Image (cartoon, rainbow, N blue to C red):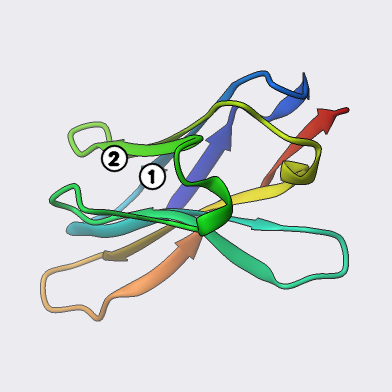
Amino acid sequence: VQLQASGGGLVQAGGSLRLSCRASGSIFSLNNMGWYRQFPGKQRDLVARITSDGRTKYADSVKDRFTISRDNAEKTVYLQMNSLKFEDTAVYYCQAALRQYKGSYEADYWGQGTLVTVSS
């Protein structure tokens, strides 16, 4: 199983970016998907999460600015980030909880991380 993230980059404060993350490989069921971010020297924290039936959860710091969505057919999760702030600068990681085979345990998989830099 691989999670391939894309869409990071450099943007001015107030701008927008859209992150994408596609899961590939042997996947029987794809459950929660999410985005986390990590600041230098800090732990990885939840940004947003979406269940397989579309229920969402956001960190307070990104509510009303970020929107998570998913395309189950494409096994892809998106993060639309608007009104970006300098303090959103971080490495963003996608995550997926999935079962590889019928009867297998659910496990978390992570993408490689994509850097988002917001200039002030």
Return the x and y of residue 104 as percentages of the image width and height.
20, 78
Numbered disc 2: secondary structure: loop
Would you identify the image quadrant in which residue 114 lies? top right
Q: Considering the image in quadrants, where does the N terminus appear?
A: bottom left
- Residue 103 in percent (x, y) is at 12, 78
Left-right relation of 55 to 40: left
Identify the residue at image location x=47%, y=50%.
2
Instruction: List x then y, in percent, for residue 29.
Output: 18, 59
Residue 43, placed above or below residue 85: below
Instruction: State whether residue 17 appears in this view.
Output: yes
Q: Nearer the viewer, residue 29 or 95?
A: 95
Eyeballing the image, is 2 above or below 45?
above
Residue 23 placement: quadrant: top left
| Disc 1 element | strand
Is 21 placed left or right of 119 in the picture? left
Crowding at label 2, few (<14), some or many (≥20) Cα neighbours within 10 Å? some
Q: Estimate the spatial distance between the alpha carbons at disc 1 and disc 2, rounded to whole Å.
A: 5 Å
Please state if 4 lies on the left or on the right of 9 as rendered: left
Disc 1 marks a residue whose amino acid type is Ala
Residue 64 is situated, as x and y percent measured from the top left of the image, at 45, 38
Whether residue 112 is visible to the viewer of this picture, yes or no, is no
Per the image, the residue denoted by label 1 is 23
Q: Which dot marks residue 55?
A: none
| Residue at position x 66%, y 67% in the image | 44
Which image quarter holds the C terminus?
top right
Mark 1 crowd level (few <14, some 14–19, many ≥20, 10 Å Cα): many
Q: Is residue 45 left or right of residue 73?
A: right
Instruction: Indicate whether 85 appears above or below 61.
Output: above
Q: Are marks 1 and 2 in contact (CB under 8 Å)?
A: yes
Amino acid identity at mark 2: Lys
Q: Find residue 75 and name its label.
A: 2
